[in-house]
Amino acid sequence: MIRMRQIIGILVSALREIFDESAYARFLSRTQLPPSREAYAVFRREQEAMKVHGLRCC
Amino acid sequence: MPKPLRILIWLAVAILGALAVATIALHRGEQINAMWLVVAAFCSYALGYRFYSKFIAAKVLALDGQRATPAERLDNGRDFVPTNKWVVFGHHFAAIAGPGPLVGPVLAAQFGYLPGTLWVLAGAVFGGCVQDFVILLFSVRRDGKSLTEMAREEGGRLGGVVAYVAIISIIVILLAVAALIVVNALKASPWGAFTIAMTIPIALLMGLYLRRLRPGKVLEVSVLGFILVMLAIWGGQWASQTPSVAQWFTLSAPTLAILIIVYGFAASALPVWLLLTPRDYLSTFVKLGTITLLALGIIALHPTLHMPPLTRFIDGSGPVFAGKVFPFAFITIACGAISGFHALISSGTTPKLIRREIETRMVGYGAMMAESMVAIMATIAACVLQPGIYFAINSPAGIVGKAPAAAVATISNWGFPVTAAEMQSLAHAVGEQTLYNRTGGAPAFAVGMAHIFSNSLGGQALMALWYHFAIMFEALFILTVLDAGTRVGRFMLQDALGHAWKPLGRTSWYPSILATSALIVCAWGYFLWQGVKDPLGGINSLWPLFGIANQLLATVALCVATTIIIKMGKARYAGVMLAPLVWLVSVTFTASWHKMFDPNPRIGFLAHARQLTSSAGPSHELSRLIFNDRLDTFVTGILICMVALILMESAWEWARVLSGHKAARVKEVPFVPTRFAEEQG
């Protein structure tokens, strides 16, 4: 049961990383901003500025 | 586990793998079950990972569990973040898995299932997985440097320039061929076009949800987007059956090409994250879900392969693309076996997330194994179709004729019986007017996938829905590659032009954004237009060009890796990189030579131009086709010269280091002990 919970936990963490949810959480912690529309807009601008972000293979 | 038991288990895996490979390689005359391919793949990957990658990790690279990675040393909570290995694995896999491993094996299935399968297995275990693993580790030891930077630092200025040209070429040709696949999948398909059109308002809605209602809740909004897309697929049936709506979405290939070119420019030049970012998330969500579903579907259905192991087209006369099995099978399937593009991802975001050096093996080697498995699934999806149907879908009108009667007669004469009634019934079952001449691989893959899904879930009644789900999945996927690729190409061009005039390098200066976006879009748009207008379907010219460009990038990556290994004092192990390098160079050179100079006009660009010149009087259309042939020859020539240059420069560097004329000094960052050393590796 504990093992299963660990596997699900890792799967959820992987999905949160792939879908930038973890990156947003780190952004909030780094900038000390509360979660808000404005904070998310700043986060998105920062992500867009990272040139390798979103590089997808063929 | 006791050692004797471990030995017994690995012996059993080896025997089972050998049996599976022997079955798929030696079976003649009888159809085999797809599970043999799955078993062969699982056993090959397991053995490759357990023994070959372990050997490379221990002997060649000497992975150091005590050494801190850049994610730990430079942790900034932004791009450098020490991350759980499974999370990095998922992240890396999501970035390397694109349309390539789905489309390449479908096209190569014209040779039968055997050449593609053997190349995918051997290419991945000895080439692709090794390349991804080694480049990832070398980037980790250099603070996450890119392939271009490593090529410049370790090889020389020329290596950097070649890597740059290869990346730009691959981006341009990849985007053209990807766009062509979408055009061929959506032309004259109101259902497909409607579904893809609907993803635009859906993505905008997702963007608004993310921005206004629940900022940052991406997984939540992706689930919502997925449900809406499924509704759009269902609505597509209504749209295709309602004449007044269907006429709006029944688009010709040139119209679709123009729409995609405009989309690519807008995606690169306009601040449209509200549309693009949610689409990217939606595409990734659908991609991961579909790959999982396809794997489950194949295991549940364990279908029979109807395609023979080898077809008569290994002689080079294939209708899908012309050229013999060697070298063309090996440039047609790149992603899934070895893909240079992966070296960009392995030296991009991933090295900045690796928490411990020893985890590069699982992430680099392991994720490529998973990608290779996707290619095996695509081979299965293509080969479960009756060969006659496969060829009717994938053959261009220029080869089999436009009329159904002519097409089925030609294909049946090749020894792959198919009737017009069968094709009509299949088109009806998937909700299309026709399935003839749908080159590019995507429609054939969609029919195969719909066959597997509908037989495992929902029966024939859902065949049309599954087909359009597959088409939507591929088109969405490819459009995401298209907008991300155009933007990356624009950034690279701005970087280069910034050296000539500084303002051009500023990514926030709008005239520069517009000009560089236009340049990149015009470049791939030209090749797309050429493909759309090509009487042979476009794939025949463009896919080999894409394969050559991709393998050129792999050549650069393998040369850089060999140079570093020699400088590390491990020249006796350089064969690990040299073996795939020699193979790739021989494949790339042979394929390029054929594409440029083969006397068969279906293969050689120049022979085709000569045939056009002598076949009819001058016309604008003819002149354009001749110009395109010469342009393709020129592009191929440039690519192959690049391969030769990088090889010569690398060989010179190896000779100088090995003969003691140059100090063997690698440019790694100094050792710093990790705080994660106590964790179990």
Image (cartoon, coloured by chain):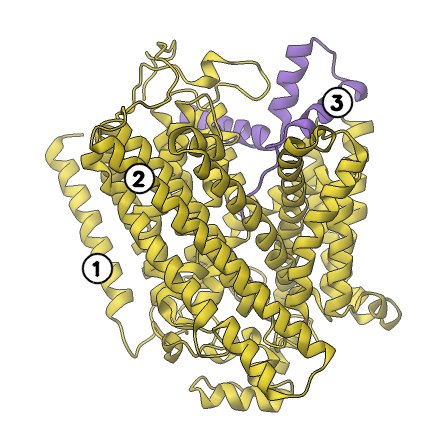
Q: Chain of mark 3?
A: A
On the picture, is B516 further left or further right than B344? right
Of residues B82 and B17, the one drawn nearer to the viewer in this rendering: B82
Chain painted purple: A
Image colour assigned to chain B: yellow
Q: Chain of mark 2?
A: B
Secondary structure state at the residue bearing disc 1: helix
The quadrant of the image that shows the N terminus of chain A is top left
Q: Are marks 1 and 2 on the same chain?
A: yes
Of residues B624 and B235, the one drawn nearer to the viewer in this rendering: B624
Task: Identify the amino acid type marked 1.
Answer: Leu
Task: Identify the amino acid type marked 2.
Answer: Trp
Label 1 with label 3: CB-CB less than 8 Å: no
Of residues B81 and B228, the one drawn nearer to the viewer in this rendering: B81
Q: Position of residue A6 (x, y in %)?
A: 45, 25
**Residue beneath disc 3:** A40
Task: State the separation of the CA atoms marked 2 and 3.
Answer: 51 Å
Which residue occupies 42% across, 72% down?
B323
Q: Chain of mark 1?
A: B
Q: Position of residue B299 (x, y in %)?
A: 42, 55
Secondary structure state at the residue bearing disc 3: helix
Task: Identify the amino acid type marked 3.
Answer: Tyr
Residue B382 higher or lower than B154, as above or below: below
Q: Which label number is shown at residue B19?
A: 1
**Residue beneath disc 2:** B652
Residue B30 higher or lower than B164, as above or below: below
Task: State the separation of the CA atoms marked 1 and 2.
Answer: 44 Å
